[in-house]
Image: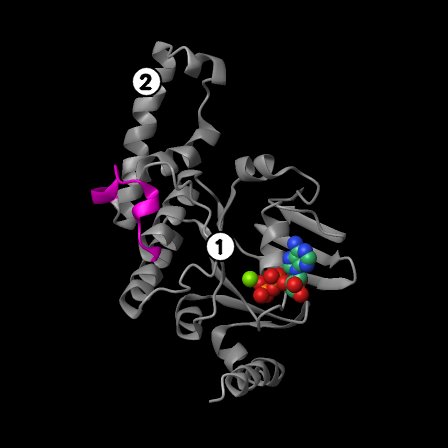
Amino acid sequence: MLLEVRNVTKKFGGVVANKDVSFSIEQGQIVGLIGPNGAGKSTMFNMVSAVFPPTIGEIVFEGKNIEKLPNYEVSRLGIARTFQNIKIFKNMTVIENVMVGLHIHTRSSMLSAAFFSPRARKEEQILYETAMEYLKFVGLEGLYDQMSSSLPLGALRLLELARALATKPKLLLLDEIAAGLNHKETKEMARLIQQIKEKGITVFIVEHDMDLVMRICDKIIVLDQGSKIAEGTPKEIQNNEDVISAYLGADIEEKAGEGA
Ligand code: ADP
Ligand code: MG
């Protein structure tokens, strides 16, 4: 198993955001994490990517316990992510944002970079070319020198994806990467995610667009009020009574709230 989450609980004061959750992710798959708003999906992503540790439980990546490791070590081990609220450096150009992702694997120290040693300069050139490759992959190469602050939402999400890929992850977490995208952009994102899988990268995705989730996922894990209520293939999940009641219940409430 690439990733094993074992009996993980996360409490924020009195709020139990994840409750005794266990599941595993096999190398090479696209796994979906779904559930109504507030189910604990982003909290789970935050623990797997070491934004914060679980209150109880273990997170094991390639056989190694990572639940107490700092964020930068977990990214060096090969876990990268995008955020529900995009975190792009707005005052940098598009290509600079991708180069930030690449920097975790370069050898030059801060000092040699500061003095522009030949080695640092050579590395910078390679970084630039590599960053361009990732921009090409997501289709943003034409915007490489634009300020990131000028990008529309769809391009920002692609840029964050390119930056995460530039860390050469084994496991890529995508938190609502299609939120706010139009139909065409969502289809393009689905195609990209499938290409990422074809490169051998395992993808763990939180997404509200059920068509997208059902189409691309090999396996789906369902959370409701912090607990795992189901796990299975898209077909199994679509027909699962507990999922239907958790989901449709929430859906009907939301629709009622909208006055529909
Ligand atoms: P989802 O991503 O499934 O919508 P979240 O994981 O964001 O759900 O939230 C699960 C619960 O945990 C919610 O009740 C939320 O308010 C709470 N929560 C999430 N993050 C924090 C935090 N940093 N501090 C306090 N409460 C949090
Ligand atoms: Mg969330």
Residue 96, percent across and down? 35, 34
Labels 1 and 2: the sequence-earlier one: 1
Residue 27, percent across and down? 51, 52
Q: Secondary structure at mark 1?
A: loop
Q: Which residue is mark 1?
A: 85
Q: Residue at x 71, y 41 (%)?
A: 68
Dot 1, crowdedness within 10 Å: few (<14), some or many (≥20)? few
Q: Residue at x 53, y 78 (%)?
A: 236
Image quadrant assignment for residue 125? top left
The segment highlighted magenta reads 141-153
> Position of 218 compared to 41: left or right?
left
Q: Ligand 2 appears in which quadrant?
A: bottom right
- Give the residue type at disc 1: Asn
> Position of 90 compared to 33: left or right?
left
- Front tag of 1 and 2: 1
Query: Is residue 91 shown to the viewer in this render?
Result: yes
Model colouring:
one colour
Identify which residue, 251 or 76, lies in the foreground.
251
- Give the residue type at disc 2: Lys
Q: Is mark 2 within 8 Å of ligand 2?
A: no
Identify which residue, 8 or 232, lies in the foreground.
8
Q: Which residue is mark 2?
A: 122
Please say if 134 is above or below 242: above
Q: Secondary structure at mark 2?
A: helix
